[in-house]
Amino acid sequence: MEAKQEKEAQIAAWLKKIFGDHPIPQYEVNPRTTEILHHLSERNRVRDRDVCLVIDDLKQKAREYESEAKHLQDLLMESVNFSPANLSSTGSRYLNTLVDSAVALETKDTSLASFIPAVNDLTSELFRTKSKNEEIKLELTKLEKNLTATLVLEKCLREDLEKAELHLSTERAKVDSRLQNMHFLKAKSEEFRFGIRATEEQLKARGMDASLSHQSLVALSEKLAELKQQTIPLKKKLESYLDLMPNPSLAQVKIEEAKRELDTIEAELTKKVNMMEL
């Protein structure tokens, strides 16, 4: 319980420090929020401590640099009786440029031994940067070519897709039309089938001969075709008799027999045809 109260007190003090004179936003106090805020306050405290240490270190270095600068200035005054205040405007400008160059090159001093390696390093870095830029340019050129090819391919694919969609739309319209026709024909077929069945039932109720039904007529038509095929060899046989020069009386008998057989077949055919026409 004491540990919880101590955490809440630390959190309150931290929030007061963070927001200062501004009001602290309302928040739900529960174990989870307390733990999260306590963790944040601890991290903030550690960070503030580290920042303070860095600031103290920088202040110490600044004091050391100031002391070193004072020492060098006194040494310069003692050795050559020279002071930066005695420089002309051009000399001061050159001196400031020298100092700025040393700061930019991050040298430890302004001696030639420090400047030459720094300039060499900067030149090497410049060459490396130029080489890297050339590589990047080549890579960009390749990417531009690939991008152009990709755009052309995309355009071709889009055109092909549009053509395919148009063709698909046309084919779909054809299929829809065929489906409609098929449905119409199927409906008509069913209508005709029911009509034929109703007509047959009506004819049957009126005493129609079953031999005159549709199925019977179809069978008769098939039989008629078969009989026609059967008459072909008989006609050929009759023609063969006509080509011979036999006994006139015997030939006359055969001819009469063939004629009677042919008349019988033709009479039967005529009867069947008349029945089909009915």
Image: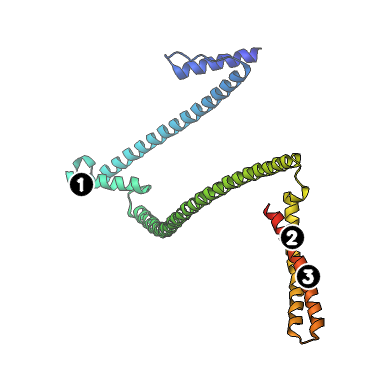
Residue topped by disc 3: 260
- Rendering quarter of residue 100: top left
Q: Is residue 209 above or below residue 29?
A: below
For disc 2, the neighbor class at 10 Å (few under 14, some 14 to 19, many from 20) is few
Residue 66, above or below 152: above
In the picture, residue 222 is in which quadrant? bottom right
Q: Provide the residue designation for mark 1.
A: 91
Residue 239 placed where, x, y %?
Answer: 73, 79
Give x and y (percent) for residue 267: 74, 63
Tell me which label, 3 or 2, sits earlier in the chain.
Answer: 2
- Tag 1: residue type? Gly
Circle nearer the viewer, 3 or 2: 3
Q: Which residue is mark 2?
A: 222
> Is 112 situated above or below 243?
above
Of 249 and 113, nearer the camera is: 249
Q: Amino acid at mark 2?
A: Glu
- Which residue is depicted at the point 77% across and 48% down? 210
Distance from disc 3 to disc 2, alpha carbons, whole Å, reads 24 Å
* C-alpha distance separating marks 2 and 1: 130 Å
Task: Residue 125: name its quadrant.
Answer: bottom left
Q: CA distance from mark 1 to mark 3?
A: 152 Å
Question: In which quadrant is the N terminus drawn?
Answer: top right
